Structure formats: C-alpha cells, structure tokens
Amino acid sequence: MASWMPLPCNKNSVRKTLLIALPLICFSSAEASEKALLSTTDSGFSKIEEPASSTKQAEPDKEIRFYISRHPAKVVPRRVLPITPDMPGEAEIVYRGGEFARKDTLLLRINPDDLALDEQELHLQLERNLLAAETEILQLTRQKEELNFITKLPPERRMYIAQHLGNNVDKRALELIERKIETIRQNASLSNERLQKAFDKKRKLREITMPFDGRIQYHVALPEEGQKALVGSNGPIVTIADDSRLYIIINMTDPALARLDASRLHVKLTMSGGNTLQAPWSHSKVQKGERGETMVYYFAVPDNMREQAWHLVGANLVAHLHYKADSGAIYVSKADLAREAGAQRFESWEELLAALRPGYTIVFNGETHLCLIPQQTGQGSIIRNP
C-alpha cells in the first residue's frame, strides 16, 4: 500500500442502474427484467449480492437486515494530521521505530542546526536582559542604603544635608526607589518570558512530536543515520493518523435514503479471501467539497476488525448498504413485481403497489428490492415515502 492518506469519496463514480422506466413500468418478459436488474455500472461493480427474485419477511423478535444499494466508500481513521514544514531546508529524522509511535514521541527536526543557533542566541539575550536589570537594581539599592543611612542621623545633621547637598530624605523617596526596583524586576521577567515563548513556538514548528498515539507515514526517503533529508514547504513531510477508531464513510446523495432512520443502517465490505467487514452507523457530518456541501455517513469499524480494515485505508471501495427492518416488513424483488404487473402500465412504484400490494407503504426503494410495511402498523419514523 503506497499511501494510507484518505481521499474524499467520489459521489459521481456510481451511476444508478435504472430498474424502472418512467413514466411507465412495463417489462415485456422475465428475461428483460432480469437483464435490467443485473446490468453492470460504469464503475465495474460486481453482480448484486441479493438474488433478484427473492422475497423476504422480517420475523417477530428476529433482526433482519435488507440490502439497499451499493455506494463508493472509504475507510478513514478517526483523525488524520498532515505535517507540512513552515520553511524549506533540512530534516533530521529522529524516530525510526516503525509505523507506530506513542504520544509526545519526537519524530523529526526541521533545520536543526539553525534551531540550535537560535537557542544559543536566546540564552545570550536572556542573560543580557538579566544583567541590565541587575545593574539598575544595584544602583538603586545603593541609593536606598544611602537614604536609610541619612534617616538614622540626628535631626540637625539631616537638615544640614538637605540644605547643602540638596538631598531631601523622607519616606516618599524610599518608597519610590522600592517601586523602581520592583518595576525593573517585573519588566526583565516579562521580556524574557516573551522571548522564551516566541522561541518555544518556533521550536514547536521545527520539532515534530506525536500529538496522540497512532501511526506515522514519512513522505521523504529516510536518510542514513547522521544524515539529513531535504524538504520543501509545499507538501507534508509526515502524516499522523489516530487509528484508535476507524470508519467506513459514504456520501449520502440520495434524498430518499437520507430520510431513513440512520441508526438502522449498516454497511458491509467484502475483503480479500472472501471475508466480510460489517459496520453499524455511528454519526453523520456535513462536509464541504468542490461541488458544495455533502452529507457523509460514518460507520464504525468493530475493534476486532480494526487491523484488517487498516489495510483498506486510502483504497477506493464499494460498500453495500443494509437496513435493519422491523417485524412485519417485507422485502420484495422489483423484478418479481415487474413480472407480476405484466403489460399493465404504472407511472411509479407507489401506483404499482396500490394495485398489486394494497395496504403497504414503501420504507425504501433499493437497488433491486423494495422494503414495505403494512400501513396500519404506524411504525413512526421508518415509514418513509421516497
């Protein structure tokens, strides 16, 4: 796998197979309907997994999941953080411990020689600021000592000094000196703190550490020990992924399917070796793309399948969407309904159902089947008309 950096789903990569020719429904033969149902899309998807002629019914107290349709899908980590250098130069690769790294692990340094010089200059500047402040404080301290000495002299001596030396001594003068000393200390401390924060911010940009436990992928060839890699500032040097949770995502572009109760949905992926990966709906997000906003459904990969699913990150996948039906729901093949309709003409599936399955409401209009429930059940949120 060359790269596991996730890419957005291409919502236009699938063209729906038309199962109904509006404004009328009229198949001339069973063979024609079967051919229409099993036609292959431009994306080269395989034959649908549900038999076209099957009809199922949800049994009481037993969960059953009905297949809806196929969708382009991706497996994505919980978080992905690409790190791009703030300036071009050299990179010292510090961490070479494999794909996994713990939080706060130092991964690499950008322009480490320049950073070391900047740190030396910082220490010199901090020392200069302290020396300048201490020099001023020393002078003020001597003035304070002189004033304290004068205050202890007899009154006539203090009066003589005040008249002939112009050095009037009172408590106000001593308080001003104390305030000057404290102001100089605070100013030196704030100046040094500001310089230190600026350098720490620069170092944070130049020393890349793990923000969380996860996986890493360098985008430069690792040099030999003691050597540095050349890097630019127009692309990431390393990508960090939080794999504590993986999701299968699909773009929900069908308004009718978007009206279904999302908590009843789950997806299934077929992996190498014939293994399947099933994931229930977790949450949805509105994401902005080149063509506007899109509703994206996230399906949480079970923890025991996380390692296998990781190898699918970055790949273009096809997910089969399923719906958990209530007791009493039936799953009817469109091909069977079309054959049953014979030469009768109907402008919609609702009109066909009114004639052939009166008393039923469409829950969803799937790729090959309709999911129906009796109208009198009144099952609230699952009764949706596409």
Image: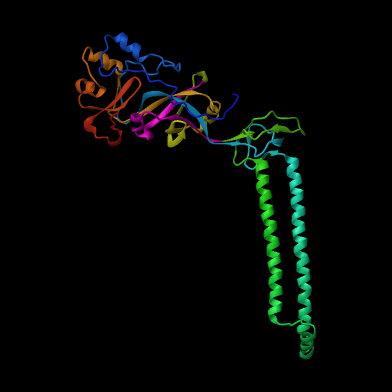
Q: Is residue 302 above or below residue 331?
A: below
Rendering coords of residue 64 (x, y %): 35, 27
The residue stretch that appears in magenta = 242-271
- What residue is drawn where x is 71% and y is 61%? 188
Residue at image position (79%, 83%) is 165
Asked whether 119 or 315 is in front, the reply is 119
- Image spot of residue 79 (x, y percent): 54, 37
Q: Quadrant of the N terminus?
A: top right
The quadrant where residue 251 appears: top left
Residue 262, relative to residue 371: is it above or below? below
Q: Which residue shows up at 43% across the image and 36% down it?
A: 286
* Farthest-out residue, bottom: 156
Q: Please tell me in which quadrant of the rendered image residue 361 appears.
A: top left
Q: Is residue 54 above or below residue 323?
A: above
Using residue 133 as the reference point, say whether residue 328 is left or right of it.
left
Answer whether residue 42 is magenta in the image.
Answer: no
Decide which of 191, 163 is in the foreground and name it. 163
Counting from the top left corner in percent of width and height, residue 220 is at 67, 30
- Work out whether residue 146 can be spotted: yes
Q: Nearer the viewer, residue 35 or 57?
A: 35
